[in-house]
């Protein structure tokens, strides 16, 4: 069976049809004031498949959530429990606990659930958004087994002083409002961002019998603010203090097959406090950070007489340095200490965990004039016990000006979350397992890229093969009656697949035409051994085929973007049911009115333009065609 899979992969790799906005190698970024932004990703993730979200896409989705942006413009699988509902990311057949979300170099995955709800994250809070496909535990530690989403700020001291006011109103009484201001100079600066969002989400959808009903109990209300203060502490050093607070109140929407309307709601409160110090010279960079994160989730379901509060805390401390030995050799290393805490009525007692880690990477450039190599190692100590050493090796070979090869292989290792180990809920019949083994395996990427540029035409093509093989995969499974859920280790989980993409840009006078298309084939299975018999079962919510097309036209003052996404059928595990395949198209049109130092931008979003009836997660309806109108006012405050 695997011979056939490998044969298909070889054929697809040679075929030369590739993935659009994705970059399979690290990108070179200029020094930003006195700092090197996100050096581990851009300098040492050589050979990995990394997609950078471009500035136009970020602008068009700036007043929406990260769930909206990534589900439209990336190959991240965002499992949305309805609009605004829990939206956990997953990459390449992995689970949300295997997909790290890294904010300014810190993994913010909840230590209890192991996930991050992307619906709560305003896109406008992040200046640089990158998706890293494939595991790199040596660089980013526990939780980065299948990939990572990197959310970073820009160099605050170098940003223009400005004021931004952004409001969006649309269907279902949806209102998003953003206020942002940055002031300062080259020695100090302060940035303040406030985001508000609310929606009734009372859209109409079809029942299985074809009749139409209105969605109930699906509203949301969100307040978020982010304040950053940065100042130079010397000619080559700077200190930054960050406060990020979010309050997200969400009604848990009535499911399609529910007999009665839902009465459940959830209130999330999240606080992140960070101190970052950095010193940079021509050959050396040293960073120190201390980050404190708290999450509090209150859940109430009057119909079931359920009321619970779940709390978690993390305190992350890290020292990280990079040294340029010469023009072609550099070394990076550091130490990390993380304290984790979980508290819940569904735990027998307060749960804690202490992690200590040491990591090092060595990079060689211009080997034989064309090859870049990076070797990395990470060693973690968890509650006094050593995890296995996690190594990785990445390579890039620029064979000529048009053709390059990329490859990366990395060991991945993940400890179980607190919920996996200790959760006990007699009402919903869900039980953790304190005897779980950690996940342990390997992640591999290999592929080619071709680039061509002539006059006003740019073309790029990429082909990438990936393979994840993880022993003791941790998964929640139902019993035969689907009434009791428990967590167990599968003997092995295996994901094999291919990403293919193409991208083009044509300039005609002042007009730029952009087109990108991507296709991914993914085969994901659990493999169990009972006696001497090996059996396979499908992983949940992993489409075998995924296709995406983006088409855009841009001039000086206006732009149009159309995105089209196709998802193959997905196995849900609920009574062996599968969700049918679906496609969704979205159209955005934008026009900019410049007035000297002022700028007014209008935008119209038509979402699900073909009015498709679909579900991302089983039993949770999604809205049909709906619109949003945005106004963005920007004022240049000068120096």
Image (cartoon, rainbow, N blue to C red):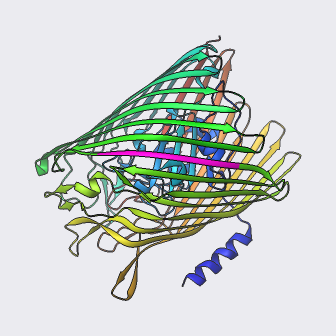
Between residues 368 and 529, which one lies in front from this camera angle? 368
**Residue farthest to the bottom, as pictured:** 532
**Magenta region includes residue 531:** no
Residue found 76% across the figure and 40% down from its top: 326
Q: Quadrant of the image for the N terminus?
A: bottom right
Residue 602: x and y, percent?
58, 30
Q: Say which quarter of the image contains residue 9.
A: bottom right
Q: Taking the image as drawn, is residue 625 in sight?
A: no
What residue lies at 73% left-to-right and 45% top-to-bottom? 329
* Tally of numbered tags: 0
- Against 150, residue 585 (above or below) is below
Quarter containing the C terminus? top right
Q: In the drawing, does residue 378 fall left or right of residue 280?
A: left
Instruction: Name the residue furthest top.
Output: 639
Which sits in the foreground, 32 or 614? 32
Looking at the image, residue 448 lies above or below residue 343: below
- Report the magenta residues as a range: 353-363
Percent position of residue 629, x then y: 51, 34
Q: Is 596 placed above or below 32 here?
A: above
């Amino acid at each position: 069976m695997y011979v056939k899979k490998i044969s298909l992969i070889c054929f697809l790799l040679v075929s030369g049809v590739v993935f659009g906005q994705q970059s399979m190698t690290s990108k070179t970024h200029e020094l930003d004031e006195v700092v090197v932004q996100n050096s581990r990703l851009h300098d040492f993730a050589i050979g990995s498949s990394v997609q950078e979200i471009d500035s136009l896409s970020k602008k068009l989705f700036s007043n929406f959530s990260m769930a909206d942006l990534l589900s439209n413009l990336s190959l991240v699988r965002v499992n949305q429990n309805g609009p605004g509902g829990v939206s956990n990311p997953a990459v390449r057949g992995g689970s949300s606990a295997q997909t790290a979300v890294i904010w300014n170099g810190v993994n913010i995955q909840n230590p209890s659930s192991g996930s991050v709800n992307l619906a709560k994250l305003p896109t406008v809070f992040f200046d640089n958004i990158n998706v890293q496909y494939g595991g790199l535990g040596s660089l980013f530690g526990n939780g980065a087994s299948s990939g990572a989403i990197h959310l970073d700020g820009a160099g605050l001291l170098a940003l223009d002083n400005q004021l931004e006011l952004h409001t969006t109103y649309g269907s279902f009484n949806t209102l998003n409002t953003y206020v942002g201001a940055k002031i300062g100079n080259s020695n100090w600066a302060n940035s303040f961002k406030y985001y508000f969002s609310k929606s009734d989400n009372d859209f109409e959808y079809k029942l299985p019998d074809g009749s139409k009903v209105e969605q109930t109990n699906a509203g949301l209300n969100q307040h978020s603010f982010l304040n950053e203060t940065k100042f130079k502490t010397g000619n080559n050093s700077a200190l930054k203090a960050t406060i990020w607070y979010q309050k997200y109140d969400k009604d848990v929407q009535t499911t399609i097959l529910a007999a009665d309307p839902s009465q459940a709601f959830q209130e999330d409160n999240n606080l992140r406090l960070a101190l970052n110090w950095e010193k940079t010279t021509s050959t050396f960079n040293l960073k120190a950070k201390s980050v404190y994160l708290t999450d509090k989730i209150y859940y109430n379901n009057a119909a079931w007489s359920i009321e619970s509060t779940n709390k978690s805390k993390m305190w992350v401390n890290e020292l990280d340095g990079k040294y340029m030995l010469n023009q072609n050799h550099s070394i990076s290393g550091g130490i990390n200490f993380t304290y984790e805490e979980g508290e819940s009525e569904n735990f027998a007692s307060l749960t804690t965990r202490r992690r200590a880690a040491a990591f090092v990477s060595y990079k060689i450039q211009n080997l034989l004039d064309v090859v870049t190599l990076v070797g990395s190692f990470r060693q973690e100590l968890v509650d006094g016990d050593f995890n296995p050493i996690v190594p990785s090796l990445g390579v890039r070979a620029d064979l000529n000006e048009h053709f390059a090869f990329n490859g990366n292989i990395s060991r991945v290792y993940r400890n179980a979350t607190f919920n996996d180990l200790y959760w006990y809920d007699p009402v919903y019949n869900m039980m953790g397992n304190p005897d779980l083994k950690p996940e342990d395996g390997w992640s591999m990427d290999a592929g080619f890229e071709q680039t061509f540029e002539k006059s006003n035409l740019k073309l790029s093509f990429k082909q990438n093969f990936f393979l994840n093989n993880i022993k003791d995969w941790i998964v929640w499974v139902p019993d035969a009656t689907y009434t009791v859920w428990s967590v167990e280790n599968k003997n092995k989980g295996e994901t094999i697949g291919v990403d293919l993409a193409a991208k083009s840009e044509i300039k005609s006078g002042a007009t730029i035409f952009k087109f990108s298309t991507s296709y991914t084939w993914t085969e994901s299975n659990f493999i169990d051994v009972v006696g001497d018999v090996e059996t396979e079962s499908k992983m949940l919510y992993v489409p075998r085929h995924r296709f995406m097309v983006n088409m855009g036209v841009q001039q000086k003052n206006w732009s149009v973007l159309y995105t089209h996404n196709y998802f193959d059928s997905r196995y849900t595990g609920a009574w062996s049911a599968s969700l049918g395949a679906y496609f969704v198209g979205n159209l955005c049109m934008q026009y900019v009115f410049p007035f000297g130092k002022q700028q007014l931008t209008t935008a119209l979003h038509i979402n699900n333009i073909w009015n498709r009836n679909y579900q991302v997660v089983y039993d949770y309806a999604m809205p049909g065609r709906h619109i949003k109108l945005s106004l963005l006012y920007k004022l240049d405050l000068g120096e």
